[in-house]
Image (cartoon, rainbow, N blue to C red):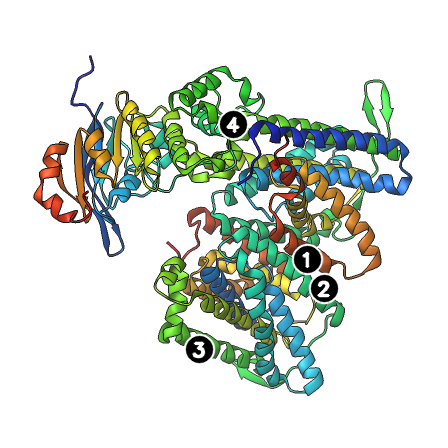
């Protein structure tokens, strides 16, 4: 960053900050899905990043065949639902409540999803064309309109999620199951339905995240690896099962990493976040927002 | 519930060890070059699998971060030969030290965490170390890796060269036998039995007066050291190390080996390593997407039995 | 001769809150050496919570706990056990795939010279072996010593857990519902064991069965809604009107 004048540095930092925040919104969607799945089902889903990847790949195909990017926001959730519901019911059910076993099982699923993507989509990273190539002038900087749109859509989804969980009766059931599954079952809540709903919801969040990210990042069959690592860090720092914590941690971490990546290499920036995580764990072994 | 009784179960594992060690010993003389190379790998993987069993099978700590120790051990040997110009045996001591250091670093942060956090944080450790290793190509050689020239191994008056495949083979076999004997001693000792009791019921052990955290940490670090040893032997065998030694493959394979062979049996994982090595050798040549089968295998073993092959045999009553 | 009236275990105004729920309300309790004390009360009265707080599994919201005069309020469960307080659990905690002998050995091992020994086979350590055999014989588990804990009957598992708690050489033994869920015949066995134990040990017993408590205990404490509502010798408690009212239908 040397050789830049002060106003240039400030605008660059702002630019990176906004980039980071928007990426943080996407990660927030994905990490919330992860957190919900763990909170309600007790499953550590290693394949969650690959659902994100699947969303991106599917969006690529929707754009390729139908020419309309926004259609994928409708189609991808449906496809994810059709695959994730039976997956929960028939494959993952026995591992619920067992973090280690579920993690290993979802690794297996992750391999399968990755290889299928490799076989169909191929190993070459490609980008989805920007569906809204307009730039807006923000504070003297040209900012891509699509990214602002992503921010808007993410915020809408987050609000919708909040409304669902806190304002609907079904959402109350989900949160109750998150607190104490046995008690919920004893109170007559159809826990099985809650399990499928939660898993589908969490997976759809990841898939939609992938759709939103496909014009920004390269669509590549291994793109889920980086996302799952980030999501895990977010969820550990925020606190597994704490939705508020996940949201805050996602926004903060991604903005921070975005800014750091200007001075350090992306890998070093990631390592810096990792060190922060390690330090937080020393004092709060359950994350910042859990008791 | 299983009908096995204490005294009988022990001997199954010992018979397997004797059988395999003898088998490996004989095979070294008669196998052709290509097959011998595969078996050397199997033996290295057996040490890795045993080391991992100490963590997962003996204290129920499902770590996904052991690739850090494998790569660390490999580079420990490589760096010491490259930069410190040490001999073969001292290089393995550096591997062990690498395992000790990295094990302590990872363990002090992770072991006290509850199960879900532990699995996730160890996975994060592996990810970040892998990233760093790939990135710091000036140090690790990145993807392409670093090649080394092996010095001769001198024991007294006799000098051996590990470039001779047969020497390499028996060198590795020796370490397999040694590792087995050490781990068997530990398993039968008070420390080992406390490890088992922690696996059986951690809360109970705590309420019998034990500082369970310390025992788990020791098991974890020992596990890291044996893993690092296998990494060092692997690097010596290949005369090469790359950032790939930190990849997820080395974190997940030990889990699969232990599940197939039997958690907590010490020799079970050897069978897992042998079976999966053969599987990969043949199937990967035949189908590019054989990893799908791999995923299916993982799902199957988890469903069918956690006991694994040796575990199952140990639990049957022998009249 | 050691002075009598020496309080081995003492809680002073121990309160435990879980959010809005008051589980223990200023409970002051003490046990003297050689006593066999019973704790009874309806479900949810706080009996097991009391044990949990005393043994360090939970931290009290306020109040203090003393063991042999030493403040153990903030200690971890394993430290408290090392200082001489051992317990059994309502849901019996055993080692499923370990033999009876090995299970007892675990507690014994901690008190030997080198519990961390990684080099000598456990069977060769003589003092541990001797003590383990002694306890197995004393508790009547010798014939079953090679059986895996998961293969024992539920009653035998309860006896095993008591043996394990005993292996730590406690000064005070806390037994949480040792006859719960056990067949009548095995209840007799367990009662006999506790009776034999009571001649050598200070015991505190949570029980649902009035039979056991009336027969074995010197002093009975009655809990209800987190408070001690009555305390005294068995004859007095069984005649206590408030106790009878609370137990309406539950006393046989």
Is label 1 or label 4 in front? 4
Residue located beneath label 2 in the image: A115
Callout 2 and callout 4 share a chain? no
Toward the viewer: B83 or B223? B223
Chain label for disc 1: B
Compute the Cα span from label 2 to label 1.
10 Å
Is label 3 or label 4 in front? 4
Chain label for disc 2: A
Compute the Cα span from label 1 to label 4.
40 Å
Is label 2 or label 4 in front? 4
Residue located beneath label 1 in the image: B295
Q: Is residue B98 above or below residue B64?
A: above
Q: In which quadrant will I find the N terminus of chain A?
A: bottom right
* Residue B115 seen anywhere in this rendered image of the structure: yes
Compute the Cα span from label 2 to label 4.
49 Å
Chain label for disc 4: C
* Residue A5 seen anywhere in this rendered image of the structure: no
Is residue B137 shown left or right of residue C227?
right
Q: Residues within 10 Å of mark 4 (few under 14, many from 20)?
A: some
Earlier along the polypeptide chain: callout 2 or callout 3?
2
Toward the viewer: B246 or C190? C190
């Amino acid at each position: 960053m040397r050789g830049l004048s002060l106003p240039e540095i400030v605008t660059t930092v702002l630019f990176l900050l906004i980039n980071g925040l928007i990426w943080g919104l996407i990660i927030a969607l994905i990490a919330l899905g992860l957190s919900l799945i763990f909170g309600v089902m007790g499953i550590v889903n290693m394949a969650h990043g690959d659902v994100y990847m699947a969303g991106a790949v599917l969006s690529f195909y929707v754009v390729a065949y139908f020419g309309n990017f926004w259609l994928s926001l409708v189609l991808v959730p449906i496809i994810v639902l059709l695959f994730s519901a039976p997956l929960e019911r028939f494959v993952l059910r026995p591992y619920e409540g067992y973090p280690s076993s579920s993690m290993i099982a979802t690794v297996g699923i992750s391999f399968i999803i990755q290889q299928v993507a490799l076989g169909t989509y191929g190993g070459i990273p490609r980008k989805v064309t920007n569906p809204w190539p307009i730039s807006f002038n923000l504070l003297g900087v040209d900012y891509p309109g699509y990214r602002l749109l992503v921010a808007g859509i993410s915020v809408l989804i987050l609000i919708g999620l909040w409304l669902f969980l806190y304002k609907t009766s079904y959402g109350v059931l989900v949160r109750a199951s998150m607190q104490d599954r046995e008690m919920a079952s004893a109170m007559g809540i159809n826990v099985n339905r809650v399990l499928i709903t939660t898993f589908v919801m969490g997976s759809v969040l990841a898939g939609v995240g992938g759709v939103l990210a496909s014009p920004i990042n390269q669509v590549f069959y291994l793109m889920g690896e980086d996302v799952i690592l980030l999501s895990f860090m977010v969820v550990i720092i925020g606190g597994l099962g704490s939705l508020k914590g996940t949201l805050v941690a996602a926004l903060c971490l991604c903005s921070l990493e975005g800014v750091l990546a200007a001075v350090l290499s992306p890998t070093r920036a990631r390592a810096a976040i990792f060190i922060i995580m390690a330090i937080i764990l020393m004092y709060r072994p359950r994350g910042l927002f859990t008791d | 519930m299983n009908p096995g009784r204490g005294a009988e179960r022990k001997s199954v594992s010992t018979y397997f060890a004797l059988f395999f060690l003898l088998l490996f010993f004989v095979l070294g003389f008669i196998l052709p070059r290509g097959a011998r190379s595969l078996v050397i790998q199997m033996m290295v993987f057996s040490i890795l699998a045993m080391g991992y069993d100490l963590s997962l099978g003996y204290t129920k700590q499902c770590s996904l971060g052991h690739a850090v120790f494998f790569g660390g051990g490999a580079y420990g040997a490589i760096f010491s030969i490259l930069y410190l110009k040490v001999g073969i045996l001292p290089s393995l001591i550096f591997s062990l030290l690498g395992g000790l250091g990295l094990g302590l670093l990872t363990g002090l942060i992770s072991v006290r965490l509850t199960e879900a956090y532990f699995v996730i944080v160890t996975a994060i450790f592996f990810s970040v170390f892998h990233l760093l290793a790939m990135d710091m190509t000036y140090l690790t050689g990145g993807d392409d890796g670093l090649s080394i020239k092996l010095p001769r191994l001198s024991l007294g008056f006799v000098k051996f060269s590990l470039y001779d495949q047969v020497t390499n083979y028996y060198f590795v076999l020796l370490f397999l036998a040694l590792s087995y004997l050490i781990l068997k001693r530990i398993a039968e000792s008070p420390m080992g039995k406390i490890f088992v009791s922690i696996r059986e019921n951690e809360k109970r052990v705590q309420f019998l007066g034990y500082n369970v955290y310390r025992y788990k940490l020791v098991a974890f670090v020992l596990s890291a050291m044996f893993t690092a040893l296998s990494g060092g032997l692997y690097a010596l065998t290949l005369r090469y190390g790359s950032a790939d030694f930190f990849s997820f493959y080395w974190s997940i394979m030990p889990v699969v080996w232990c599940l197939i062979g039997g958690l907590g049996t010490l020799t079970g994982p050897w069978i897992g390593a042998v079976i999966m090595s053969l599987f990969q050798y043949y199937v990967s040549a035949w189908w590019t997407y054989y990893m799908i089968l791999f995923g299916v295998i993982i799902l199957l073993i988890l469903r069918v039995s956690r006991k694994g092959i040796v575990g199952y045999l140990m639990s049957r009553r022998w009249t | 001769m050691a002075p009598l009236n020496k309080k081995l275990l003492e809680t002073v105004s121990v309160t435990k809150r879980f959010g809005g729920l008051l589980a223990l309300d200023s409970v002051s309790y003490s046990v003297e050496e050689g006593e066999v004390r019973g704790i009874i009360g309806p479900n949810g009265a706080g009996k097991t919570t009391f044990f949990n707080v005393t043994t360090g599994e939970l931290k009290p919201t306020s109040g203090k706990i003393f063991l042999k005069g030493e403040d153990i309020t903030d200690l971890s469960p394993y430290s408290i056990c090392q200082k001489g307080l051992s317990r059994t659990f309502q849901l019996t905690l055993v080692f499923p795939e370990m033999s009876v002998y090995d299970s007892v050995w675990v507690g014994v091992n901690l008190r030997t010279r080198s519990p961390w020994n990684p080099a000598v086979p456990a069977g060769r350590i003589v003092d541990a072996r001797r003590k383990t055999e002694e306890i197995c014989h004393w508790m009547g588990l010798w014939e079953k010593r090679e059986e895996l804990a998961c293969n024992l009957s539920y009653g035998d598992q309860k006896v095993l857990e008591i043996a394990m708690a005993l292996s730590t050489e406690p000064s005070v033994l806390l037994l949480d519902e040792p006859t719960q869920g056990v067949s009548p015949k095995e209840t007799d066995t367990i009662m006999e064991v506790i009776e034999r134990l009571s001649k050598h040990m200070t015991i505190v017993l949570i029980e649902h069965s009035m039979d056991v408590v009336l027969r074995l205990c010197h002093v009975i404490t009655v809990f209800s809604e987190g408070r001690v509502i009555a305390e005294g010798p068995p004859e007095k408690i069984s005649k206590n009107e408030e106790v009878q009212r609370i137990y309406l239908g539950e006393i046989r």
